[in-house]
């Protein structure tokens, strides 16, 4: 039985090594092991000092998140850290790779911290709807001050070794063997007079008056309705008001409140869902992925340019093929402008900008992309055009090259069928802006090979994207569900609601924007073209709302035309309710014979969200998504579903499928078949189960 924590003595130093792969998470066994071994070293007369380090790729990824929600097993992490901090012999933490969350709080309880150049420390608990619960909010301010601590804890972002040294988090950066250096460092500390300094005993400097109020105002906007960021500030502020032990007790209480919250359950669900999405049952982890050393993108419009940027950002050379030299020039100029904007916003260094632009080359001759390892087509959403391009690519590109399409709705099998390499054809549905949005829906065709899937999933990770594998159907998973969600929103307008009311309900639920404001950002002409294509096959008796078409016929395409569902003043993105739109809506209501009625917010939320959930259940039933948590990941990273709600399918389980089912039945009685529960949802509801039980 492998020890979760190992012990050895070297040169009079007790070396304690966390050994719980893959990230040395601080589960119960690890906590007990560390506590026991520190006590052992403390009692060992032959030991003058202690080194705490981690085996494998990192020091420690934090508390074991899987334990949350289970009955607590002692010792708690604060108890373990107290044993370390009160040890009269110096304890030195030796950090390499990540030291995150509890994996950073443990070293903060040590008397000294040394780091390898690879080390990165972070307190990312807020991304899990938590606050640091083992002293991070009390000890870090004593090392780096409250202002810097607020920055570290509210961003959750990692601090690299060099910055950690200059901030005073680590005492030394060492090259060469880390443990050797830590032992030497520890022995030097042991020679010093008196007990080692404890971080808890250090003073906290008071910030400028009003500092915490300003921080609260900032997060009220940025983290609207979220508990954890507010509790982080409260706990850090306590360091300026309370003695250490009282601050620590309050921190723990705030942490436990967060841990039990629905918000944290939602965010923890997404943490694991994102990692589950990478596991494809019929594509084993050891499936050999092809090396991607060069990429070609077809089309230099908004999507093509965005895709090229994130490929170059990952350090991969990319050629953009555009037959029209003017369009190419404009596209390349847009890329340069966007990179310069990132430099201005401090997201990119000047050097990184130059490196990124240096990897992007525009070409107008298809022969110039024949050697690419993968070609990503990102042209206009038209089947005939895409088929023409794929037939051409099939003859020009080298045999082993993967041909990917960025279509957001079209049938990947139909596109693959015009090539002689259907097993190397796949969908890579990026989301606009492609260099920012983290989601890529990876669409497998009927013949797409395991190697092609493995290669593209690996490429997505390299592009720092979250790749989710889905089956091919009209709109795949995300857009198919979105279609039903927006359709309900349009029907609600016909029956009595207005865009601002619907958007407010969805905004209050936690989305950054409601469907109408989103439509205006994305451009109403994009979805208009899709509706026009679908009109050819739409059943005559299917309910259809003409409101959006009317606005488009008036040339109202959203922000880009300063008018869409809302009006926009020059230079402003603030939506203004527009009487012109209201007139169109009232006109259509009258035309369709609706007596407009007052619609309450609950009905709006139910109809928009339960439609979404029901369509998600149908997609699962059809096997077009591997698991319900994949659908949650798609909606969080592609459609701005609030992470603290865990995604539509997780939210449905939290509400209870029986409640969702009964509401859908009620809505179906009034509004017809669109709300008839999917067989899967019905079965799970009647069996008192959830999507998580699938
Ligand atoms: N607990 C449990 N499992 C974890 C884990 C954790 N903290 N971290 C990672 N895993 C699993 C993960 O699910 C995956 O499993 C495998 O390890 C590899 O992870 C008291 C309350 C450390 C940067 O927020 O950010 O401490 O899918 O694929 O890309 O204040 O994992 O293979 O079965 O992500 O190399 C705070 C969470 C916890 C950091 C490594 N810590 N982890 O990234 O590998 S709360 C965090 C990460 C806390 C205290 C509080 C990353 C990583 P599987 P991976 P990676």
Image (cartoon, rainbow, N blue to C red):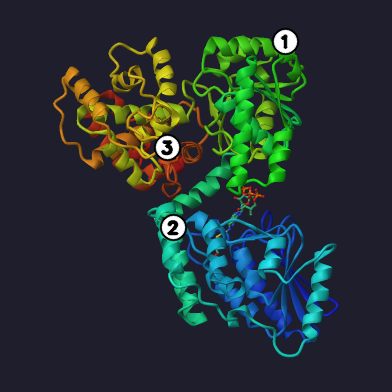
Q: Which residue is mark 1?
A: 395
Residue under label 3 = 571
Q: Is residue 371 above or below residue 497?
A: above
Q: Earlier in the sequence, mark 1 or mark 3?
A: 1
The percent position of residue 167, horizontal first and vertical second, equals 66, 67
- The vertical placement of 308 against 322, above or below, is below
Please report whichever mark, 1 or 2, sits nearer to the chain's N-terminal start.
2
Residue ranking furthest to the bottom: 194
> Where does the image place residue 81, in percent across and percent down from the top left?
61, 74
- Residues at marks 3 and 2, CA–CA distance in whole angstroms: 24 Å
- Compared to 664, does 471 lie above or below? above
Which of the pair 29/186 is nearer the observer? 186
**Callout in the foreground (1, 2):** 2
Q: Is residue 569 rendered to the left or right of residue 154?
A: left
**Viewer-side label of 3, 2:** 3
Point 56% across, 11% down: residue: 385
Using the image, determine if residue 658 lies above or below residue 9: above
In this figure, which residue is indicated by the disc labeled 2? Answer: 218
User: In the rendered view, does 458 fall on the left or right side of 82?
Assistant: right
- Tell me whether the residue at label 1 lies in contact with that at label 3, contact meaning CB atoms closer than 8 angstroms: no
* Residue 317 picture location, percent across and down: 74, 31
- SS type, badge 1: helix
Residue 56 place in picture, x, y as percent:
74, 57
Which residue does the image show at 66% across and 30% down from the upper left? 456
Q: Is mark 3 within 8 Å of ligand 1?
A: no
Taking depth in this image into account, of 663 and 555 the one nearest to the observer is 555
Q: Residues within 10 Å of mark 1 (few under 14, many from 20)?
A: few
Tag 3 and tag 2, C-beta contact below 8 Å = no
């Amino acid at each position: 039985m492998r020890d979760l924590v190992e012990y050895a003595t070297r040169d009079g130093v007790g070396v304690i090594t966390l050994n719980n792969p893959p990230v040395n998470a601080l589960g119960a066994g690890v906590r007990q092991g560390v506590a026991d071994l520190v006590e052992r070293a403390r009692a060992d007369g032959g030991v003058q000092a202690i080194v705490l380090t981690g085996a494998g790729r990192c020091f420690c990824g934090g508390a074991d998140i899987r334990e949350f929600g289970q009955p607590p097993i002692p010792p708690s992490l604060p108890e373990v850290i107290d044993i370390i901090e009160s040890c009269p012999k110096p304890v030195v933490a030796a950090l390499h790779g990540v030291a995150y969350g509890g994996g950073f709080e443990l070293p903060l309880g040590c008397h000294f911290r040394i780091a390898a150049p690879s080390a990165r420390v972070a307190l990312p608990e807020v991304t899990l709807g938590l606050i640091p619960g083992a002293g991070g909010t009390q000890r870090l301010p004593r090392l780096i001050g409250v202002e810097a601590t607020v920055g570290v804890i509210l961003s959750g972002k990692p601090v690299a070794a060099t910055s950690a040294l200059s901030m005073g988090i680590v005492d030394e950066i060492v090259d060469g063997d880390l443990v050797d250096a830590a032992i030497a460092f520890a022995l030097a500390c042991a020679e010093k007079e008196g007990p080692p300094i404890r971080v808890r005993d250090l003073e906290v400097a008071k910030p400028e008056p009003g500092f915490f109020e300003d921080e609260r105002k900032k997060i009220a906007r940025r983290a609207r309705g979220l508990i954890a960021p507010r509790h982080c500030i409260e706990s850090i502020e306590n360091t300026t008001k309370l003695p250490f032990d009282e601050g620590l007790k309050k921190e723990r209480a705030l942490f436990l409140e967060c841990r039990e919250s629905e918000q944290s359950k939602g965010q923890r669900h997404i943490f694991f869902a994102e990692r589950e999405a990478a596991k494809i049952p019929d594509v084993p982890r050891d499936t050999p992925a092809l090396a991607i050393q060069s990429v070609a993108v077809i089309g230099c419009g908004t999507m093509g340019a965005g895709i090229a940027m994130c490929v170059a950002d990952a350090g991969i050379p990319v050629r953009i093929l555009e037959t029209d030299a003017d369009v190419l020039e404009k596209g390349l100029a847009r890329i340069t402008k966007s990179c310069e904007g990132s430099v201005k916003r401090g997201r990119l260094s000047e050097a990184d900008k130059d490196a990124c632009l240096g990897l992007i080359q525009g070409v107008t001759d298809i022969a110039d992309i024949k050697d690419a390892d993968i070609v990503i087509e990102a042209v206009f959403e038209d089947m005939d055009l895409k088929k023409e391009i794929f037939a051409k690519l099939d003859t020009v590109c080298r045999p082993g090259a993967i041909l990917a399409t960025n279509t957001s709705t079209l049938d990947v099998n139909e596109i693959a069928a015009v090539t002689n390499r259907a097993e190397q054809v796949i969908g890579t549905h990026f989301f606009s802006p492609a260099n920012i949005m983290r989601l890529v829906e990876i669409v497998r065709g009927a013949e797409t090979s395991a190697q092609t899937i493995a290669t593209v999933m690996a490429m997505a990770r390299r592009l720092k994207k979250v790749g989710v594998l889905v089956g091919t159907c009209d709109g795949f998973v995300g857009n198919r569900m979105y279609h039903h969600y927006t359709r309900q929103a349009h029907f609600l307008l016909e029956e009595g609601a207005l865009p601002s009311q619907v958007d407010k309900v969805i905004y209050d639920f936690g989305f950054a924007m409601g469907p109408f404001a989103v439509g205006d950002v994305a451009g109403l002409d994009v979805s208009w073209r899709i509706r026009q294509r679908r009109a050819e096959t739409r059943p005559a008796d299917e309910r259809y709302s003409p409101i959006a078409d009317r606005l488009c016929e008036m040339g109202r395409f959203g922000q880009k035309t300063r008018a869409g569902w809302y009006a926009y003043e020059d230079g402003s993105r603030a939506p203004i309710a527009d009487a012109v739109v209201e007139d169109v809506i009232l006109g259509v209501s009258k035309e369709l014979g609706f007596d407009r009625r007052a619609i309450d917010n609950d009905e709006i939320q139910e109809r928009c969200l339960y439609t979404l959930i029901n369509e998600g259940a149908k997609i699962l039933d059809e096997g077009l998504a591997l698991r319900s948590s994949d659908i949650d990941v798609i909606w969080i990273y592609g459609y701005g579903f609030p992470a603290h709600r865990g995604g539509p399918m997780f939210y449905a389980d939290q509400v209870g499928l029986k409640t969702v089912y009964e509401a859908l039945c009620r809505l179906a009685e009034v509004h017809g078949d669109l709300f008839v529960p999917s067989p899967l949802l019905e079965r799970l509801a009647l069996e008192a189960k959830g999507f998580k039980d699938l």
